[in-house]
Image (cartoon, rainbow, N blue to C red):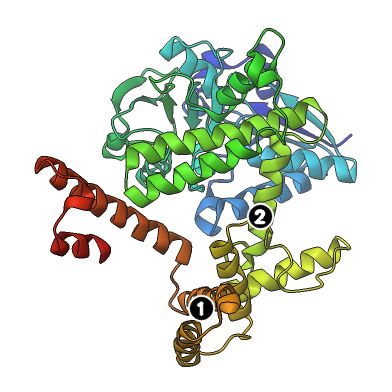
Amino acid sequence: MPQITIVGLGPGGAQYLTREAWQVLNGADEIWLRTLHHPGIEELPQRIQLFTFDACYEEEATFEQVYMRIATEVLELGRREQGVIYAVPGHPLVGESAVLQILRDARAVGVSTQVVAGISFIEQVLTALEVDALDGLQIMDALAVMALQHPPLNPDFPALIGQIYSQAVASELKMTLMYQYSDEHEVVLVDGAGTTAQQLRRLPLYELDRFPVGLLSALYVPPLPVHNCSFEVFQATIARLRAPGGCPWDRQQTHKSLRDNLLEETYEVLEAIDRGDEAALQEELGDLLLQVVLHAQIATEYGEFRMADIIAGIDAKLRYRHPHVWGEVEVADAAEVCLNWEALKRQEREEQDQPEHSLLDGVPGSLPALAQAYAYGNRAKNVGVTSDIEVLQVRVRERLSGLENARPEMRTVQFGELLFALVDWACWLEIDPESALREANLRFAQSFQAIEAAAQQQGLSLVELNEDERLTLHAI
């Protein structure tokens, strides 16, 4: 009966072949190899006819095309009466994408398969490093990591990254890892694990692409020296606070009781941004993150939703609303991005049976008035409803004039109209009025406090300053 037999050749010479693998290979008349570039090939019996798929790497444009072609050809060979023996370096299910495709395709057409295990590069690297794989070791393919803008690794645990086969891969991998680890973070470059040419090189991360790498290169990334810096560990900390025997205050909190805390922490983040204080911003973002995770933990306990649901939801939303990044849509500029964004949001509501009654739906009623006006103005501007900037300038002057002549009972209305016109103007100038006013408040406070300090040095109160100094304060 036709069969596809997939054999792992191990990481090095014939001494690393399992007894089962040796029996299968020794009894074969022909063997199809993914590559001849393996130290154990020359130790196979000379009578065996060897074929290789090395040419695929030269003839195909991408690895995906290489693996697909190999899978297709192996499946065809497996349909023969004698079947086929396909041999790969290491273990057939460690870093061998074509093997997975072969198994899926063979199952779909009813061709029998057998996987003969082999020692992978992982065991040899663990031996060389004297590392326990069950101590939280994360194992990744270098190509998968380098294709991302941020490494999908938990920095509280070690990581092993395989298949660093070229300097280009090493360079891209280094740049991705630097989003999680410092430039000076010590890593271990492992070459030829399990072979006579085995070499371990400890180096700072930024030097990764300055040393030769090849088909037998892997990278060991130790955890960060500062513990408890991963998102998952932080979630565990919050869960412990909420658990029996945890903190009485945290245990009694609800979504509603934390509302004021969330608002306060948000404004403290804004204040740190306005001051340009990076250290304070780091701390305040942590406090804000605490609120998010605490709400997620409360929801988890009551079966409402989990943190994974929050992340999956916002990730899906971002990808859906950025078809110019994750799709085929082309945009000319940021303004066109905003138009697409609003159109996609309307489409989402329709699909969820929540049709929009107004373009302004979704702007929170609890927003500060200035921020709410800005949101309204931007939505109107994005669909071309508002006037052009010259008309807005006239409106501001008219509202200012109207305020001067308004009856006392109409002054609040006129002043509100003036503020809204100013916010509309800010929309056209692409200025966030909330931020602009907060920055002006900060400048006023700094100047006010400076004059206070000057008065105190003279032994005076603010009311005792001379007229010129009071006018200076008034003009701030």
Q: Nearer the viewer, residue 77 or 149?
A: 149
Amino acid at the residue labelled 1? Leu
Label 2 vs label 1: CA separation?
Answer: 21 Å
The image quarter in which residue 326 lies: bottom right
**SS class, disc 1:** helix
Q: Which residue is located at x 58 percent, y 80 percent?
A: 381
The quadrant of the rendering that contains the N terminus is top right
Amino acid at the residue labelled 2? Ser
In the rendered image, the vertical position of residue 273 relative to residue 333, given as above or below: above
* Residue 418, label in figure: 1
* Residue 340, label in figure: none
Q: Which residue is located at x 70 percent, y 42 percent?
A: 310
Residue depth check, mark 2 versus mark 1: number of the one nearer the observer: 1
Q: Which residue is mark 2?
A: 366
The image quarter in which residue 209 lies: top left
Rendered location of residue 129, percent (x, y): 42, 14
> Crowding at label 1, few (<14), some or many (≥20) Cα neighbours within 10 Å?
many
Along the horizontal axis of the image, is 396 left or right of 50?
left
The mark nearer the N terminus, 2 or 1, is 2
The quadrant of the rendering that contains the C terminus is bottom left
Rendered location of residue 220, percent (x, y): 43, 24
Rendered location of residue 217, percent (x, y): 41, 31
Q: Which residue is located at x 54 percent, y 58 percent?
A: 59
